Amino acid sequence: MRRKFVAGNWKMNTLGQSAAELARALAQAWPRAKPQVEVAVCPPFPYLASVGAALAGSGIELGAQNVSHEKPGALTGEIAIEMLRDLGCRWVILGHSERRRLMGETDALISKKVTAALAGGVPAILCVGETLAQREAGQTWAVLDAQMQGSLAGVEAVAMNDVVIAYEPVWAIGTGVTATTAQAQSAHAHLRRWLSIRYNPDVAGQTRILYGGSVKPDNAQSLLGQPDVDGALVGGASLKAADFLAIVRAAESIINP
Ligand code: 13P
């Protein structure tokens, strides 16, 4: 069975004090790793160390929001995968739509980052998702397929053990508009079929596919209850300990009703 996974993407939010406070509150509420639900938070780079310290010994893992595809060396302003591993990062989010759209990241660049992350021993949460215009033009499946194909270029089946997919429809991110459970389920099922064809049924069966886009305490249970929705990548609601924990508990309640 695929272990449910709830990850918080703090994006470019918090300062040192609020990051540490949020991490401490989560660590207290979720002191031990649980077999059925995996939990992670991905703070901004400057707070990885302090958040990592606050989470030490708890059941919550640390992740980053981006990484360079290059090896350590002369590359001003970039962060190498070795540094993330050194800081105790267990995950790195790659290909987020905000980076695709605002920072010009292409599938070709994202695939280099995925390859660097996996080679560096840090599993990736790879984000894919269509815009509203693409959905309305009936291009959703083609867009998802192209993003998967391009971003996973060169990633072999064995390496897929260390990849989690996040389906994040761009129109649902930070908008308060959530995909319906039917829309989410059908996109996830589509992505799983893609994994089966590109790789094999084992990879498709074992790869976790998270939903992201305005996940809140009041919609988490119905989204996470869909057969192909294995968890959530949470933005805004991950900045409030009570809301994020409510989403984590919703994931837990599906397994232990
Ligand atoms: P929101 O939950 O704020 O819509 O953000 C989703 C997201 O982009 C997570 O990566």
Image (spheres, rainbow, N blue to C red):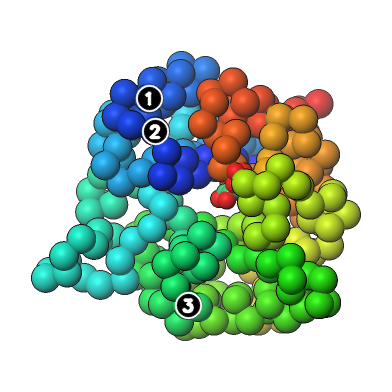
Q: Using the numbered discs, state the Cα–Cα distance from disc 1 to disc 2 in whole angstroms.
A: 5 Å
Looking at the rendered structure, the kind of residue marked 1 is Ser
Residue 44, horizontal then vertical, whole percent: 36, 44
Q: Residue 14, labelled with which disc? A: 2
Looking at the rendered structure, the kind of residue marked 3 is Thr
User: Which residue does the numbered mark 1 point to in the structure image?
Assistant: 18
Q: Earlier in the sequence, mark 3 or mark 2?
A: 2
CB at disc 1 and ligand 1 closer than 8 Å: no
Looking at the rendered structure, the kind of residue marked 2 is Thr
Q: Residue at x 43, y 24 (%)?
A: 22
Residue 168, horizontal then vertical, whole percent: 65, 57
The answer to whether residue 46 is left or right of residue 193 is left
Query: Who is closer to the viewer here, 204 or 82?
Result: 82
- Please say if 112 is above or below 248: below
Give the structural element (helix, strand or loop) at label 1: helix
User: Which residue does the numbered mark 3 point to in the structure image?
Assistant: 106
- Please say if 74 is above or below 173: below
Q: Tag 2: Cα neighbours inside 10 Å, few (<14), some, or many (≥20)?
A: some
Q: Using the numbered discs, state the Cα–Cα distance from disc 3 to disc 2 in whole angstroms.
A: 28 Å
